[in-house]
Amino acid sequence: MSQSVHRPLGSVERLYWLIDLVAGANFVVVAELTGELNESSLRIALDALQARRPLLSVEFIPAGARWVAFRPCEQRLALRTLKLCSGEAWLPFAEEDQAQRFDLQSGPLARCLLLTYPDQHSVVVLTFHHSICDASSGVTVMRDLIRAVSEILSGEPVSIDATSPVAPLEHELSPWLLSARGFVVNTWRMAARWLYWLTTGVPKEIPEDVVVAIAERRDRTVLLEFDEEQTASLIKVCKAAGHTVHAALYSAQVLAVAEEFPERSPVLAVLSLVDLRRRSTPRVENEAMGLRIGFIVTSHRIDKAERSVSLARRIGQSIHRELALDNHRLMLPWLARTSDAIPRSRDGAATLMTRNQKLSPGVSVLSNIGGVAWEPLGRQLTVNAVQFFVPVCGVGNLASSAVTFNGRLRWNFTYSEPSLSKARATALAERAKNLLLSHGSDLA
């Protein structure tokens, strides 16, 4: 059995808790499966996973306006099952589950939805409160859950190891932040950037005037899929061009936004995510739940006549420069600490959202392009796809998430800009996909 969690929230965890008060901070991981999955086997697997992952058994203690803590809870993870017709889309049900608020003082802060189809096809939806899990650890939790289900269906004991609760992110970042390199160089560079943006205008392509109400967060995700041949070709082209697939995704998304909003500023800010735990010393075990992700923001002047390969190279070079300076270690803790002076209330959260939206990037890409490592799961269960999508608030005005699984790239767009209709957002996403498929054509 794993240790229980009973401690004050770290600054980053408090940031997500505060944002959730007004904007919602849930995100969803989805696995599409074929095989003999049933509710009873999934229930046993959820119980086994919850017993081994302490953050799946927590709730919040509100202790005044300035202090919030995790405490253990004894409730089981909620499991709901819906039977769908053949061909019925799972996305509306996943979006609805994402929009449903957690009872913060009566945990746990995660739940599971099982969607079943008549042809032994099923979809597992895991929804998390953002304070306990993010895109990196969330996909890992899904992997462990499916592995446990497979073992149960095979009559084998669940082999998932228990993990100890991890410390808040700032505990491992503090020594670096207090170093001369971390405190002086990066603080100066970051302060200069924010000052420039505040005095000259924050670079944005898509304006945001209001926070999208949780009740309105339906039909705001566009799913894109690339087959194995398209995915392999894209990877090959990116290697030949000397940049990553991540940079190519950014390039295509940014150019699509520039074409859709030609009247906007030619400077666009983009957000890249970095797995901080993977870069920490000593390294945190991959199975550990908790917050792992930090981010860096880079700004780029967009020339609509520029080739996508050239833009991808520039974006990739900017990301590498920021990584070399370790700015990804500073940005998220810095933003989190700015929230410490905000009252822990809905009004305080609204104030924070208003401030942060003025500084938020226009677009962002959350990606796991390298794919997810899944061992063979036996004959009873086949995993066809794993993907995730993010809340429409707090990650820029147009966010996309990308996962490569079984040689297929899945790229999901989620938009928060109120003026974007579903048809317009779909057209923008398809334009980005076409730009990506034609990426590197100028290399020939």
Image (tube, rainbow, N blue to C red):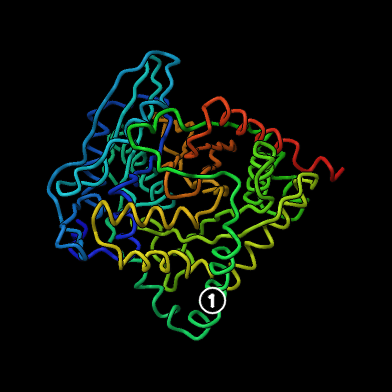
Instruction: Report the number of discs.
Output: 1
Residue 121 seen in the current view: yes
Q: Residues within 10 Å of mark 1 (few under 14, many from 20)?
A: many
**Which part of the image, by quadrant, shows the N terminus?**
bottom left
Q: Residue at x 52, y 28 (%)?
A: 421
Percent position (x, y) of residue 227? Answer: 63, 30
**Residue 47, image quadrant:** top left
Q: Which residue does the numbered mark 1 point to in the structure image?
A: 186
Q: Residue at x 62, y 33 (%)?
A: 428
Percent position (x, y) of residue 206? Answer: 57, 44
- Is residue 406 shown above or below 326? above
Residue at the extreme bottom: 180
**Tag 1: residue type?**
Asn
Most foreground residue, 274 or 228: 274
Residue 167 seen in the current view: no
Percent position (x, y) of residue 281? Answer: 44, 73
Residue at the extreme front: 199
Whether residue 177 sits left or right of residue 241 in the image: it is left
Whether residue 401 sits left or right of residue 117 in the image: it is right
Percent position (x, y) of residue 343? Answer: 25, 62
- Is residue 329 shown above or below 293? below
SS state under label 1: helix
- Is residue 181 shown above or below 191? below
Most foreground residue, 271 or 444: 271
**Residue 166, image quadrant:** bottom left
